[in-house]
Image: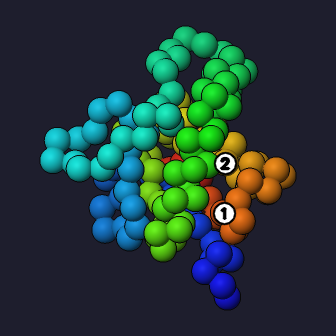
Amino acid sequence: MSKQMEPMKLVFTSYRGSIGMDGLKVSMDRHSPKLCSHPTLNYLVIPTIRNLNPANVERICTAVLDNNWNLIRDFIDEVHELGIRQLVLCCWCTKEQIAQGRFCSAGIIGRYIQDKADRDKEFEFPVEIEYGDGREVL
């Protein structure tokens, strides 16, 4: 298999869930835990959207992703070119919080990127999305 066709796996998980994972770890939140050195991808940080109905939340998140798509795509492309095949995207949400209904943007971001990869053929390599630490239900 050529290097270009090797898949890129994007794993959405919590900071806690990322411990021991291989790949490049990045933060999707403005703030990360103390002693955490994950760089923050500011173009994936979703604004605070408390008290909005789910349809409006999805619309706002999609608008942020649309506005930042070139940055997101270029970052994934560059990481793949460096030979890194797993990108771990971390946020604060834990499995327990998600089970209690706390909003987590991982599902919206993951679906958005997968849609761009599958429908719009934005990448020259397969993109696989995986959810960890309770995000499977998003």
Q: Is residue 51 above or below residue 12?
A: above
Q: On the picture, is 29 further left or further right than 46? A: left
Q: Determine whether the residue tagged by mark 1 lies in a helix, strand or loop.
A: strand
Mark 2, residue position: 113
Q: Position of residue 37 (x, y in %)?
A: 23, 50
Outermost residue on the top side: it is: 51
The answer to whether the residues at label 2 and label 1 have Cβ atoms under 8 Å apart is yes
Q: Is residue 97 above or below residue 10?
A: above
Q: Is residue 76 above or below residue 106?
A: below
Q: On the picture, is 17 further left or further right than 57? A: left
Other-residue count near label 2 (Cα within 10 Å), few / some / many at <14 / 14–19 / ≥20: many
Q: Earlier in the sequence, mark 2 or mark 1?
A: 2
Residue in front for this viewpoint, 134 or 115:
115
Q: Is residue 129 above or below residue 115?
A: below
Residue at 70%, 22% in the rendered image:
59
Q: Determine whether the residue tagged by mark 2 lies in a helix, strand or loop.
A: helix
Q: Position of residue 1 (x, y in %)?
A: 67, 88
Q: Amino acid at mark 2?
A: Ile
Q: Position of residue 100 (x, y in %)?
A: 49, 33
Outermost residue on the left side: it is: 35
Mark 1, residue position: 127
Outermost residue on the bottom side: it is: 1
Residue 100 in sight in this render: no
Residue 114 in sight in this render: yes
Residue in front for this viewpoint, 5 or 55:
5
Please state, as top left, top right, bottom left or bottom right, where the C terminus lies in the image. Answer: top right
Q: Amino acid at mark 1?
A: Val
Q: Between marks 2 and 1, how big is the CA–CA gap?
A: 8 Å
Q: On the picture, is 93 further left or further right than 43? A: left
Q: On the picture, is 31 further left or further right than 76? A: left
Residue 17 figure quarter: bottom left
